[in-house]
Image (tube, rainbow, N blue to C red):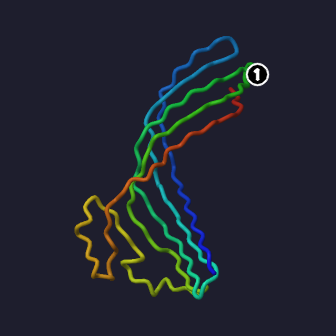
Amino acid sequence: NSSNKTEAKTSYLPISLTLKVKSKLEKITVFAGMGPTMLMAAKGIETFSETGGTAPEAYERETTFKMGLGYHALAGIEYGLTDKVNFIAQLRADQVSIKTDKDELTKYTVDGVDKLSDVPVRYKNTTYLEDDTTDNPSKDTVPAIERAYMVPANNFTLNIGISYGF
């Protein structure tokens, strides 16, 4: 009797430019904003492990993505606690997607023994392109070519904090 476990994690560096409007009413400032968002250096790591069975397998696969471009919107309030200290609450929504670039099998074991060097290049590496017709499935010594696809990286966040003005 065996069981499988798969995990996927993606990280990226978001860069945003926000046009923000504010309206101050005594101690409360209400604000809203929007603008473009870029996702840089996006990378995903998928891990798979099998327990039990006759020859349990485990692997790790790393996928890199091209820069993503989208937009964001935010709204919130600032409440003046003192002349220099504010309480801030902000809602933010990001709509952005990233496109696959390359994929690499970085770890592969069978029954706890490293078997990565036994895997043909075609199954270790994938290059994602708009046109995948140049792929040659009969050639194991070069990376596979697959059609690039989009991965949503949408986000909705609530930020709460304290700001201090100098």
Q: In screen coordinates, is 24 left or right of 63? A: right
**Residue at image location 59% in from the left, 77% down from the top:** 50
Front-lying residue, 24 or 94: 94
Q: Secondary structure at mark 1?
A: loop
Residue depicted at 62% across the width and 14% down the height: 24
Placement of the C terminus among the 4 image quadrants:
top right
Instruction: Tell me the quarter of the picture where residue 11 sits.
Output: bottom right
Residue indicated by mark 1: 81
The residue positioned 55% from the left and 62% from the top of the image is: 8
- The x, y position of residue 69, in whole percent, is 40, 44
Q: Position of residue 60 (x, y in %)?
A: 53, 72
The quarter of the rendered structure image containing the N terminus is: bottom right
User: Looking at this rendering, what residue extends furthest in the right direction?
Assistant: 82
Furthest residue in direction left, as rendered: 133
Check the image and report above or below for 88 versus 157.
Answer: above
| Residue type (three-letter) at the residue carrying disc 1 | Leu
138 or 14: which is nearer to us? 138
The quarter of the picture where residue 23 lies is top right
Q: Is residue 159 left or right of residue 110?
A: right
Choose between 151 and 73: the one closer to the eye.
151
As drawn, 87 above or below 72: above
Left or right of residue 2: residue 70: left
Please say whether residue 10 is visible from this viewpoint. yes
Residue 99 left/right relative to 155: left
Residue 128 x, y percent position in the rendering = 34, 63
